[in-house]
Image (cartoon, grey):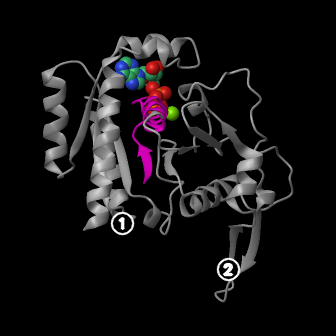
Amino acid sequence: MKIAVCGKGGVGKTTISGLLCRTLGNKGIPVLAIDGDPNPNLALTLGVDPAAVMPKALSSKLLEVFEKEDGKKYAKLKAPLAEVMDLHGIQAANNVTLLAVGQPEHAGTGCMCGIHTTVREIIHTALEESEQVTLLDLEASLEQMKRGTSKYVDVLLCIVEPYYRSMEAVARFQRLGNELEIKNIVAVANKVKNAEDEEAIRQFCAQTDLPVVAVIPFDTIISEADKGGSLDMNAIDHSPALKAINQLADTLLKRVRTSANK
Ligand SMILES: Nc1ncnc2c1ncn2[C@@H]1O[C@H](COP(=O)(O)OP(=O)(O)O)[C@@H](O)[C@H]1O
Ligand SMILES: [Mg+2]
């Protein structure tokens, strides 16, 4: 199963990504988590100690540039995924490995291909080659995905909060996901405070036939635990949001299994 997580900035992508990975990992499923955000903090929601040594910054030296018949230059990753993991991977707890690719490289490496191309190529390769359940925490756009990447992505998880701009952003992600031909495009309602919040999201999503596969309550246990930096699973043991994320993990496993059998 390969999951890409999108949504407007601040809706809870990184929080849900981290906790979803750990929940799946705790069910005995090894997970590869990819942080595609230029401001990477998936490590923290995965419980990685902030003082831990972070992997090397990404370098466009990992790319090989070649020319196609059309005379245009293209870039592709020259290293196998295992090599990229050696340089940029971190072993986190709960059966999760993290690949942090979002952080910018040092200036002046002399490569003409931009960091965006490198990030996209690494993501593409990781999705293609990884045999683990793989989750991609995207920056607040689908810029890092390209046509062709989507054939490896089973699920586009659109995180949505109960306010208009966030819902409108999700409608945009749904359109982009359709253009990329992703099979399962689904919404997750987050920070839901009451029945009206839930209804607002459900009504909005119903207009574009976007299934709401989970409703995660606004939960101060999460926001309080988050203030300390690294998210401690023991501290959020009784969190209603974590319980909803656990159900989401089961729903996704079932949904992907069913769509694979079709
Ligand atoms: N269900 C929730 N209840 C309460 N706070 C939440 C919830 N989900 C996320 N948050 C808080 O919202 C803030 C933004 O979350 P984050 O995951 O960083 O968003 P994004 O990655 O989409 O920018 C964080 O402070 C996080 O603790
Ligand atoms: Mg984030």
Residue 63 higher or lower than 166, as above or below: below
Taking the image as shown, residue 178 lies to the left or right of residue 142, namely left
Q: Is residue 243 magenta?
A: no
In the rendered image, the quadrant that contains the N terminus is bottom left
Verify whether residue 15 appears in magenta: yes
Looking at the image, residue 114 lies above or below residue 52:
below
Residue linked to disc 1: 181
Label 2 crowding class (10 Å Cα cut-off): few <14, some 14-19, many 20+?
few
What residue is at 38 percent from the left and 58 percent from the top?
154
Residue 104 is tagged as none
Residue placed most toward the observer, 52 or 188: 52
* Amino acid at circle 2: Lys
Residue situated furthest front in the rendering: 28
Q: Earlier in the sequence, mark 2 or mark 1?
A: 2
**In the image, is 82 to the left or to the right of 41?**
right
Q: State the quadrant of the C terminus.
A: bottom left
Q: Tell me, yes or no, if residue 191 can be seen here.
A: yes
Residue at x-position 71% and y-position 56%: 82
Crowding near pointer 1: few (<14 within 10 Å), some, many (20+)? some
Q: Secondary structure at mark 2?
A: loop
User: Rounded to the nearest whole Å, what is the CA distance between mark 2 and mark 1?
Assistant: 25 Å
Res 194 → quadrant: top left
Seen at 26% across and 36% down, the residue is 214
- In terms of secondary structure, where does tag 1 sit? loop
**Is 37 in front, or is 163?**
37
241 relative to 169, above or below: above
Residue 202's spot in the image, x, y percent?
16, 37
As rendered, which of 26 and 137 lies closer to the eye? 26
Residue 247 image offset from top left, x and y in percent: 29, 34
Q: Which residues are magenta?
A: 1-25
Residue holding disc 2: 72
Give the amino acid at mark 1: Glu
